[in-house]
Structure formats: structure tokens, C-alpha cells
Amino acid sequence: MAHLARWLHTYLSMLSFSILLFFAVTGFTLNHAEWVESQQRPRTYQGSLNVEWVKASDPSAIATQEISAYFRQTHHIRGALSDVHIQGDQCEVVFKGPGYEADATIDRGNGTYQLSVVPGNLMAVLNDLHKGRDTGKSWSRVIDFSAILMTLVSLTGLTLIFFLNKRRMPGLLLIALGALLCCAIYFMWVS
């Protein structure tokens, strides 16, 4: 059992090293966002598109594929089309991706639009990847897989402590101390 736990711990640690390092660094940058984030100024565009694309009164009947293709081709918009709103004589179309947002307000009467694009810097992209914000199902699976790997690395490491006679008790005491310290900080200063 000790040999299997050591083997699993070693190779699962190597497999998860990059993703663990990524989540550790971005966890720190999220906790200290004021240190690393810089405000990006939105870029704004104006223009007009085919008014027939936005004539429908039901958001599901708006020509979203055509509108999306138009903005991607004309203004090089990235991200997924995340929302379409109709409010009276206006239609709002929102594109989002990690560290990125583009928002277009379209006049449904004549097809003119105002487009605002807020590109994020590298840290905004990395922080959104950490949170899984606007990243899609594929990245969500990466987060799930990394959580499973980190859990297995932790459990195999815990298993190993039971096979180290001289270090078992101090190791278990440190585990308990770490858990108690987190709980104490939460109850004394957070909740």
C-alpha cells in the first residue's frame, strides 16, 4: 500500500504540477487584484447593420448568427455571444470571454449601433480562467479535472504519512493545526 501511495502521489503530483501552480498564482493575484490589474479603456465603434436582423420583437427571433458574424468580421470581436436583450426600440448584444467583453446597442428602427469593447490584460484573462468566468464547458472540465487531481494528490500524501512511523504523529498534528487555524481565522475574523 505504501509503495502504491508513493507512486500515485509522485506521478499525480507531476501530472498536476502546472495546473496547481497556475491556480496557486492566480489565487494570489485574485486576492490582491489591486496589485496587478490595470483598467483597460474601452474602445468604441459606431456603424450600421442590416435593420432586418433586429426587427423581431422576440429575442429568440433576432438574427444572432448574422449579427455575430458581422461584428466578428467588421470589428474582430472575440468571445461567445452571451446575451441578447430587447428593450423597446433598442437591442443589446453582449459578447464575453475570459478577460474580455464587447457590448453593442443597436437601434432597431434603422440598424445603427454603438459598440464598446473592453479588452482585458493578461492578468484579467488568467484571473477569469481561475474563476471559470466566461470560459465555456471545455475549460470547466479542465477545472473539474484539476480539482480531482489535487484531491487525489492530497489524499495520497495523507496516506503516505501513515507509513512514516517517526513523522506520523507530528504530521497528523500539523494537519490538524492547519485545519483548526483556518477554522479559527474564519470564525474570529470572517464570519
Image (spheres, rainbow, N blue to C red):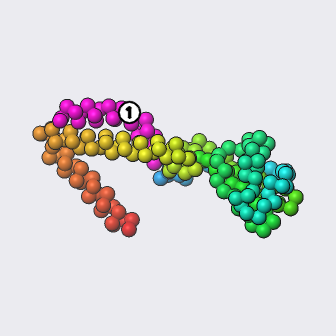
Question: Is there any visible trace of residue 160 in the rendered image?
Answer: yes
Q: Which of these two is toward me, 176 or 38?
A: 176
Q: What crowding class fits label 1: few (fewer than 14 Cα within 10 Å), some (14-19), or many (20 or more)?
A: some
What secondary structure is the stretch in magenta mostly built from?
helix
Query: Which corner quadrant of the image does residue 55 belong to?
Result: bottom right
Query: Which corner quadrant of the image does residue 56 belong to?
Result: bottom right
Q: Quadrant of the C terminus?
A: bottom left
Relative to 185, 164 lies left or right: left
Query: Which region of the structure is painted magenta?
Result: 1-27
Relative to 23, 127 lies left or right: right
Count of numbered circles on the image: 1
Question: Is there any visible trace of residue 101 in the rendered image?
Answer: no
Q: Amino acid at mark 1?
A: Leu
Relative to 7, 108 lies left or right: right
Assign a secondary structure to mark 1.
Answer: helix
Measured as percent of width and height from the top left, residue 145 is found at 41, 42
Residue that protrudes farthest toward the left in the picture: 165
Residue that protrudes farthest toward the right in the picture: 110
Residue at 33 percent of width and 35 percent of height: 12
Q: Which of these two is toward me, 75 or 70?
A: 70
Measured as percent of width and height from the top left, residue 148 is found at 37, 44
Residue that protrudes farthest toward the front in the picture: 61
Q: Which of these two is toward me, 56 or 187?
A: 56
Measured as percent of width and height from the top left, residue 113 is found at 81, 55
Residue at 39 percent of width and 65 percent of height: 190
Residue 186: in magenta span: no
Residue at 56 percent of width and 47 percent of height: 135
Q: Which of these two is toward me, 23 or 69?
A: 69
Q: Quadrant of the N terminus?
A: top left
Residue 6: in magenta span: yes
* Residue named by callout 1: 15
Residue at 79 percent of width and 57 percent of height: 54
